[in-house]
Image: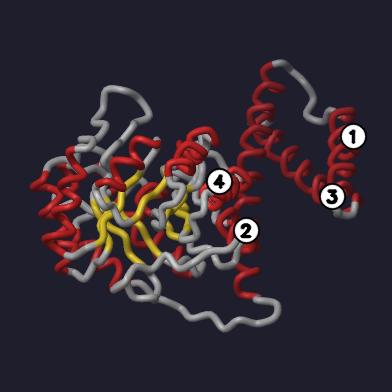
Amino acid sequence: MELESILLPGVEAKRPIIIAGPCSAETEEQVMTTAKQLADRGMKIFRAGIWKPRTKPGGFEGVGVEGLAWLKEVKKETGMYVSTEVATAKHVEEALKADIDILWVGARTTANPFAVQEIADALKGVDIPVLIKNPVNPDLELWIGALERIHNSGLKRLGVIHRGFSSYDKKIYRNLPQWHIPIELRRRIPNLPIFCDPSHIGGRRELIAPLCQQAMDLNFDGLIVESHCNPDAAWSDASQQVTPDILDYIINLLVIRTETQTTENLSQLRKQIDECDNNLIEELSKRMRIAREIGTYKKEHNMTILQTDRYTEILEKRGSQGALCGMDAEFIKTVFEAIHEESVRQQMEIINK
């Protein structure tokens, strides 16, 4: 994929490139106050949601076209570049008319190839940086497909935003980071700029600082962070926004490590190993929880713990699956014997209580 720099004049080519501003443009006063505070702290690119479709109807869904005039005023008053999300061809038309500098495509839109193609068609003949958020579900091919659709319309200044992936099983994060997915995207398209959206990954302002640091440790190019002059009074996503002052503090504390490239690029590969190991432990924990539920069922129905036919079926099936994935069947058998042993131990604890 042939790409060109997304950097705009006056924006330094050093990590992290910062895009900051409120989740939603709410009032002209809120937009201008936030923008001026960010500009005073050296921020060069302002963001604000103009159209904000929510998960459920009834919430604040953006001020619409009226807010684009406020972004124009931000450019005039502060000299900052301005950016917003577009989800339809009409949004693109209005944003271009208002001289918006950077556009991004949201996660829900990325998940819909029809919507992405509509945006791509509306952008034909236009030279503007466009950032693509990952789809809501962890589907790398869908993410790359959205990039290709925009690229095929002639746009070369492209980047992506990693905002995490939705999950039914909520834990620490609002959206699970699954860092291995943007890491694989970078391996596939090495020159692609990657921004991290810690606000949507974390969902809570206290998680923004560590997530920003993680993104820098993974060699991401930039951060897109939700910042509001009065976060607690925000009309949308109040809990994940920080003041410009706090954002400045977070950025100044970041440790930006320079990586010496080697043939093996071991540090990058080890980060992937760590991520895989973390995922393995989480999945094993989930499996053991289900095993304990089975143990409870067996106790209630006076069943024996060891079901030999089921155990044999697991070993045979998993061995075959492992072989198809390029692993030794005996290795897989050894792994699942250990997993089964731990499952039996946990079920015995339940039955013998």
Please report whichever mark, 4 or 3, sits nearer to the chain's N-terminal start.
4
| Residue 207 coordinates in the image, percent (x, y) | 36, 55
- Can residue 274 be seen from the camera position used here? no
Q: Which one is nearer the viewer's eye here, 201 or 47?
A: 47
Q: Residue type at mark 3? A: Ile
Query: Residue beneath label 4, please?
Result: 149
In front: label 1 or label 2: 2
In front: label 3 or label 2: 2
Q: Which one is nearer the viewer's eye here, 275 or 17?
A: 17
| Residue 239 coordinates in the image, percent (x, y) | 27, 44
Residue occupying the far front of the picture: 125
Query: Residue beneath label 2, please?
Result: 184
Q: Residue type at mark 4? A: Arg
Query: Residue beneath label 3, please?
Result: 332
Q: Residue type at mark 1? A: Thr
Report, in whole angstroms, how far the alpha carbon at label 4 lies from the one at label 1. Answer: 47 Å
